[in-house]
Image: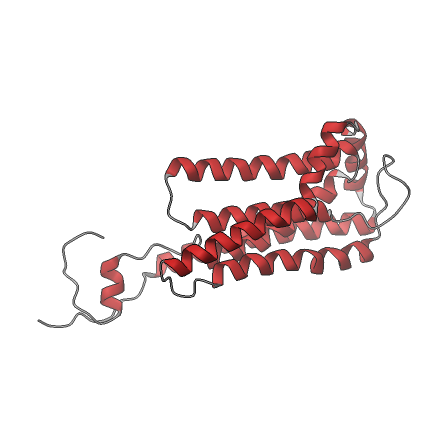
Amino acid sequence: MPVSPPRTLPAPVGLSLLVRLCVLVGLPVLLFALITWQVVADGPLIGVDERLSRALVHPDRLSELLADLGNVQVAVPVLALALAYVAWHGRARGADRWWLPPLAGALAMLLVPALVAPLKAWTDRPGTPAVPPAVGYYPSGHTATALVAYGAATLLLLSVPRSPAVRRVLVALCAVLVLGASYGLVRRGYHWPLDVVASWCLGAVLLTGVALVAGHGAPPVSRSTRRSSSGTPSPSTGPS
């Protein structure tokens, strides 16, 4: 039987992936650059940010508990458990490079303080009236920690086969934790709203990398395509 020539993924698939990457990375980077410029230059967005903060700030016990969801002591152990489970599952089923997705999640978490700390020192933004006088509040480290920890844990757990209902619960739980932490930080007055939005942008870029490594950003490749690309015979009809 003649051997089918190797086939590559069609150009539109690669173009679609490139467009998605531009949206998932480019837009957050542009928004983060705009917010940072406003913070450094004390632009008009800062006045809007301060007025919004005054309208939202109402320190109470609930807002403090929600803000604590962004603590390293709370968020990082959740990610660590997810990393351990995904690594164990991948190794148990003999997956190639089973260690790579957990490594990507851990690296994303390590990049949070590496990126946030220099930005805090450079922007030197003061805190809200609800906290003692200090500087270094931009961007929000707690928001970035919550988003990357819970987001990376969710992306990695979604890479493990499970029912659609469980996947929806995981995504919903991640959204509740991240939004709850973000709301608590603003409501308690620990951060200005723009501090939180800027950390969403940073976290989105880091999570895009985790998603790509975990396989969520790669186009689906059928079994017949893999066989053809490896040089083995592939029938012209059959499941795609």
Residue at horizontal 46 percent and vertical 54 percent from the top? 86
User: Of 125 and 69, which appears nearest the observer?
Assistant: 69
Q: Residue at x 48, y 63 (%)?
A: 100
In the picture as drawn, the residue positioned furthest to the right comes out as 133
- How far from the left and from the top, in percent, is residue 91? 41, 61
Q: Residue at x 43, y 66 (%)?
A: 97
Q: Is residue 54 left or right of residue 6?
A: right
| Place of residue 65 in the rendered image (x, y in percent of width and height, measured from the top left) | 71, 33
Q: Which x, y percent locates residue 124? A: 84, 52
- Quarter of the image where one finds residue 130: top right
Q: Is residue 98 above or below residue 6?
A: above
Q: Residue 53, located in which quarter of the rendered image?
A: top right
Q: Is residue 178 left or right of residue 62?
A: left
- Closer to us: 29 or 164: 164
Q: Tell me, what colour scheme is on the image?
A: secondary structure
- Residue 140 located left or right of residue 12: right
Quarter of the image containing the N terminus?
bottom left
Residue 200 seen in render:
no
Number of callouts in the render?
Answer: 0
Q: Is residue 181 above or below residue 100?
A: above
Q: Is residue 203 left or right of residue 162?
A: right
- Residue 61 at least partly seen: yes
Q: Is residue 138 above or below residue 172?
A: below
Q: What residue lies at 64% left-to-right and 46% top-to-bottom?
A: 75
Residue 190's x, y, as percent? 79, 39
Q: Quadrant of residue 220?
A: bottom left
Q: Nearest the camera: 34 or 110?
A: 110
